[in-house]
Image (cartoon, rainbow, N blue to C red):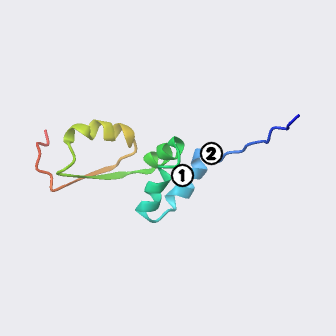
């Protein structure tokens, strides 16, 4: 009979501390491609987002749901209706 190996995983809080120390945006973006869990963890770490004129305002509710810890939304060159 084969013995099952005990599998240990890091808690999300540990991953958050690791991901938060990454300095380059490209590294953080690459992490999101590894698995859904890492995507979820990095989403929770995002506190600001920048929207440009090319971003449809209709997706704002989805962005707010995805990035639940946002504290700052920056509009750059936005020409649409803010209402």
Question: Count of labels shown?
Answer: 2
| Element carrying mark 1 | helix
Residue at left offset 48%, top offset 49%: 33
Seen as rendered, the residue at the extreme bottom is 23
- What is the crowding at mark 2: few (fewer than 14 residues within 10 Å), some, or many (at least 20)? few
Depth check: give the residue in front, 31 or 18.
31
Depth check: give the residue in front, 29 or 12.
29
Task: From this view, report whether residue 28 is shown above or below residue 64.
Answer: below
The CA distance from mark 1 to mark 2 is 9 Å
* Quadrant of the snapshot with the C terminus: top left
Q: Which mark is residue 52?
A: none
Residue at left offset 11%, top offset 42%: 81
- What is the crowding at mark 1: few (fewer than 14 residues within 10 Å), some, or many (at least 20)? some
Residue at left offset 60%, top offset 51%: 14
Q: Is residue 54 left or right of residue 44?
A: left
In terms of image quadrants, where is residue 9? top right
Q: Is residue 8 left or right of residue 57?
A: right
Question: Badge 1 is on which residue?
Answer: 16
In terms of image quadrants, where is residue 11? top right
Seen as rendered, the residue at the extreme front is 1
Seen as rendered, the residue at the extreme top is 1
Image coords of residue 50 (percent x, y): 27, 54
* Quadrant of the snapshot with the N terminus: top right
Question: Badge 2 is on which residue?
Answer: 11
| Element carrying mark 2 | loop
Image coords of residue 23 (percent x, y): 46, 65
Image coords of residue 22 (percent x, y): 50, 62
Q: Is residue 70 left or right of residue 50?
A: right
In terms of image quadrants, where is residue 69? top left
Image coords of residue 2 (percent x, y): 85, 37
């Amino acid at each position: 009979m084969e013995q099952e190996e005990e599998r240990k995983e890091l808690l999300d809080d540990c991953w958050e501390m690791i991901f938060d120390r990454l300095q380059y945006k490209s590294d953080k973006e690459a992490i999101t491609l590894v698995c859904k869990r890492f995507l979820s963890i990095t989403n929770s770490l995002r506190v600001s987002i920048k929207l440009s004129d090319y971003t449809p305002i209709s997706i704002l509710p989805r962005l707010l749901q995805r990035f639940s810890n946002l504290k700052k939304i920056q509009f750059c060159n936005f020409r649409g209706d803010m209402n």
